[in-house]
Image (spheres, rainbow, N blue to C red):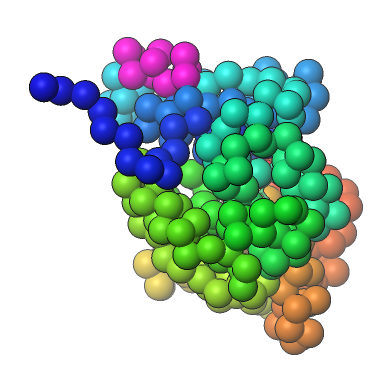
Amino acid sequence: MTGTVSLPGAIHRVGIVGSGTMGAGLAEICGRAGLDVVVVASGPASVPAGLGRLVSSLDRAVTRGKLSEDDRDATLARVAFTTELDDLADRDLVMEAIRENEDQKSELFVALDKVVESPQAILASNTSSIPIMRLARVTSRPEQVVGLHFFNPVPVMPLVELIGSLLTGEHTLQRMTEFVGGSLGKTPIRSPDRAGFVVNSLLIPYLLSAIRMVESGFATAEVVDQGMTLGCSHPLGPLRLTDMIGLDVVAAIAESLQAEFREPQFTPPALLLRMVEGGLLGKKSGRGFYPYS
Ligand SMILES: NC(=O)c1ccc[n+]([C@@H]2O[C@H](COP(=O)([O-])OP(=O)(O)OC[C@H]3O[C@@H](n4cnc5c(N)ncnc54)[C@H](O)[C@@H]3O)[C@@H](O)[C@H]2O)c1
């Protein structure tokens, strides 16, 4: 006899809030994993933009021979886009990937707590740096609030940081370990609930140091990046990586780290702040430390 055995606590219906770089990537991996996915975009104009990101990424996977055309179509059929948060009522898990702003994320968690009906449902944040406790405490279910920190590009990067606050239940962490490692086939590592978690606490001071080198005229972006790719075997140099992450995201993470630890290594350089103010956000805006067509 064949058939799917549903384990208690298994995740089938996933909600994603935000359809930008990370939200579209999350929709792709969940759809490819055979899950039922609902993506909430910020407004009507964001729906075609988010769908466009998903379709382009799936098409790239088909072109590279990583996905069949039938699987691409089946994935698209599993992902629905909406602008209504209420459409997340029946979800087992909701992952938010809206901008890295604590007030906006807290407001969203208050709303999600009211909308998502199942008492067992888990609310997760893809925040890069905001302590999970700040989001858990605004809900009535802090034991079911976690951080699931995926990396960019989501379909490619194998790591997920799993962050529980002091109030997160062990059962929730186990369900998320199974979801990430089993359903999604990624590698979870547990991180303590400190701003920046494990990876960004190490990565951000390095990226900020590289920006300071450019800012002070010590070296150009090209020279710094060549130094790290050719001299240290990094796949991307720090300025190219900053462009890929998004300069606004890097600045927001630096500010969270600075607020938590108050160490000079986390202070965002003025050059980074000016570039963000000028809309030079990196690859997603067409210009950062490098131009993009
Ligand atoms: N970019 C990265 O490399 C990276 C990596 C890991 C984690 N993250 C985290 O993921 C989150 C999203 O980052 P991103 O790079 O995808 O940003 P992004 O700017 O590409 O996308 C954010 C999206 O959220 C939408 N949005 C804002 N408020 C919303 C709301 N209330 N409801 C629905 N949609 C809303 C915006 O319209 C935008 O499309 C941030 O918390 C970021 O720190 C980013």
Residue 199 screen position, x and y as percent: 53, 69
Q: Is residue 75 magenta?
A: yes
Left or right relative to 48: residue 251: right
Left or right relative to 24: residue 5: left
Classify residue 111 by image quadrant: top right
The range drawn in magenta is: 69-78
Residue in front for this viewpoint, 58 or 5: 5
Furthest residue toward bottom: 263
Which residue corresponds to the image point at 33% horizontal and 19% vertical from the top-left?
Answer: 71
**129 shown above or below 56:** below
Instruction: Report the predominant secondary structure element of the magenta stretch.
Output: helix
- Can see residue 242? no
Furthest residue toward left: 1
Left or right relative to 56: residue 123: right
Left or right relative to 164: residue 276: right
Residue 280 screen position, x and y as percent: 78, 48
Which residue corresponds to the image point at 54% horizontal and 54% vertical from the top-left?
Answer: 148
Which residue corresponds to the image point at 49% horizontal and 56% vertical from the top-left?
Answer: 172
